[in-house]
Amino acid sequence: MRFMILLKADKSTEAGKLPSTEMLAAMGKYNEELVNAGVMLAGEGLQPTARGVRVRFSGDRRTVTEGPFDDTGLIAGFWIFNVKSMDEAIAWVKRCPNPLEGDAEIEIRRIYEADDFGAEFTPELREAEERVREHIARHDKPADTRH
């Protein structure tokens, strides 16, 4: 099972405050443990929403809004874990050094797998999805399909 581990943003991450040398070392050690255990598939910190945009969809219309955003649930970083269960994901997250000064919150969400979509995910769609994943795994750029 794959899980996305989401570090919630706070005022300091939204202000662009970078972690201390000590925090970078602690997180580096933790990430190395995850990799050595075969758990971590990816993980990155995210820049503040002031440097981001949102694209809103309404039918065929697209509206771009520049950050910063002040709503709850903003994300400061993420990991993707490959583990056997939610309990194992929780156990690994509990081992994480506190990633923020003061209180921090990390959310764990299971990633959908192909079988979760049932019959709607036809063999043709599964094959197309597999091709995309193979390209990603090889770090190839897919053919340019823009018109």
Image: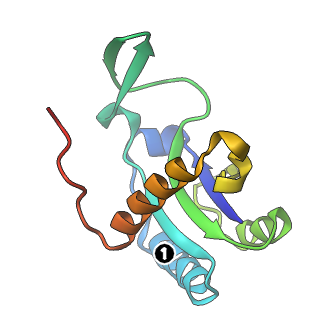
x and y percent of residue 126 in the render?
A: 54, 54
| 124 over 21 or under it: above or below | above
Q: Amino acid under label 1? A: Glu
Residue 49 appears in which quarter of the rendering? top left
| 83 over 146 or under it: above or below | below
| 20 over 62 or under it: above or below | below
x and y percent of residue 7 in the render?
A: 59, 51
Residue 119 left/right relative to 135: right
Q: Residue furthest left?
A: 147
Residue 95 appears in which quarter of the rendering? bottom right
User: Image point 51% across, 38% down: which residue?
Assistant: 11
Q: Residue furthest right?
A: 87
User: Image point 50% across, 53% down: which residue?
Assistant: 77
User: Image point 47% across, 79% down: which residue?
Assistant: 25
x and y percent of residue 72 in the render?
A: 61, 28
x and y percent of residue 99 in the render?
A: 58, 61
Q: Is residue 113 visible?
A: no
Q: Residues within 10 Å of mark 1 (few under 14, many from 20)?
A: few
Closer to the camera in the image, 108 or 118: 118
SS label for mark 1 = helix
User: Image point 81% across, 62% down: which residue?
Assistant: 86
Residue 18 left/right relative to 114: left
Q: Quadrant of the C terminus?
A: top left
Q: Quadrant of the N terminus?
A: bottom right
Closer to the camera in the image, 114 or 81: 114
| 9 over 61 or under it: above or below | below
Q: Residue furthest front?
A: 123
Colour theme: rainbow
Q: Which residue is mark 1?
A: 22
Closer to the camera in the image, 55 or 12: 55
Q: Is residue 143 visible?
A: yes
